[in-house]
Image: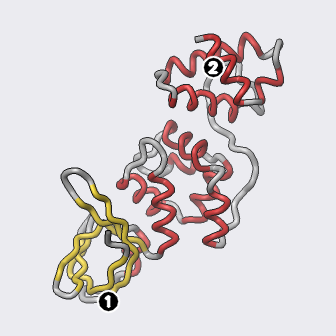
């Protein structure tokens, strides 16, 4: 696998660049930070690389530094986030801003990235919010440590409970239940059990058990 390249910028287009390394031109999809490093054709450039190997193609993605590449790889672990979307996210949001958005559960900031909808933003928060603190320490960033505040339009969800409800919906989706069905079941469970079992409304594990019993 190619982990880094050091060569001369031979050409740069809308979505890719050619880096001449010892007479061999490598086509690379660069992050926005890599693009800002390029000032002229023929410039010497050293970048970190991720090699994406698929059945019918091999693609190279270029990053300004190893930490940017690691953030890209972290994003790729989220269901529904491929290499191109992960590159778009790290290109449109500075590392500290991105980590802060995930750590604080800021869906609006994540949805500001082209290609990221509410569902994908929620998955980023739920699946990565426990991992961003370590990443932040690695790059020297400071991020909020408060609980995530996932958006929801489900009836019966009271203040303080949106994060729990959103977690349970995503858990049901991971178990194979359609999104609409998952949201409907969680909403009806909250509506019917909120008064009888208020503590369960603040515990994702307990709420998930109640929701599964209603399926």
Q: In percent of the image, x 62 and y 70: which residue is there?
A: 138
- Cα distance, mark 1 to mark 2? 55 Å
**Residue assigned mark 1:** 44
- Disc assigned to residue 186: 2
Q: Position of residue 57 (x, y in %)?
A: 21, 56
Q: In percent of the image, x 38 and y 78: which residue is there?
A: 47
Q: In percent of the image, x 42 and y 47: which residue is there?
A: 81
Which residue is nearer to you in this view: 87 or 210? 210
Q: Circle 1 sits in a helix, a strand or a loop, which is it?
A: strand
Q: Position of residue 180 (x, y in %)?
A: 50, 20
Q: In percent of the image, x 39 and y 52: which residue is there?
A: 85
Q: In this picture, is 171 found above or below 128?
A: above
Query: Which quadrant of the view contains residue 40?
Result: bottom left
Circles 1 and 2 in contact, beta carbons < 8 Å: no
Residue 104 located left or right of residue 55: right
Q: Circle 2 sits in a helix, a strand or a loop, which is it?
A: helix
Residue 130 located left or right of residue 98: right
**Quarter of the rendering occupied by the C terminus:** top right
Q: Position of residue 171 (x, y in %)?
A: 58, 30
- Disc assigned to residue 141: none
**Mark toward the start of the polypeptide (1 vs 2):** 1
């Amino acid at each position: 696998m190619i982990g880094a390249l050091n060569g001369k910028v031979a050409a740069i287009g809308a979505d890719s660049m050619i880096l001449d390394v010892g007479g061999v031109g490598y086509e690379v999809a660069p992050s926005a930070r890599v693009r800002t490093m390029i000032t002229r054709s023929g410039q010497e450039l050293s970048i970190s690389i991720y090699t994406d190997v698929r059945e019918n193609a091999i693609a190279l993605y270029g990053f300004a530094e190893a930490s940017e590449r690691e953030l890209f790889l972290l994003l790729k672990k989220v269901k529904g986030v491929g290499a191109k979307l992960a590159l778009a996210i790290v290109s449109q949001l500075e590392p500290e801003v991105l980590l802060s958005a995930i750590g604080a559960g800021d869906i609006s900031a994540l949805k500001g990235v082209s290609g990221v909808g509410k569902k994908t933003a929620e998955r980023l928060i739920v699946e990565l919010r426990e991992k961003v603190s370590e990443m932040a320490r690695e790059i020297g960033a400071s991020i909020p440590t408060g609980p995530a505040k996932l958006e929801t339009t489900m009836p019966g969800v009271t203040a303080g409970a949106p994060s729990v409800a959103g977690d349970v919906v995503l858990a049901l989706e991971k178990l194979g239940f359609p999104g609409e069905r998952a949201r409907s079941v969680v909403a009806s469970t909250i509506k019917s059990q909120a008064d009888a079992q208020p503590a369960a409304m603040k515990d994702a594990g307990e709420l998930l058990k109640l929701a599964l019993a209603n399926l």
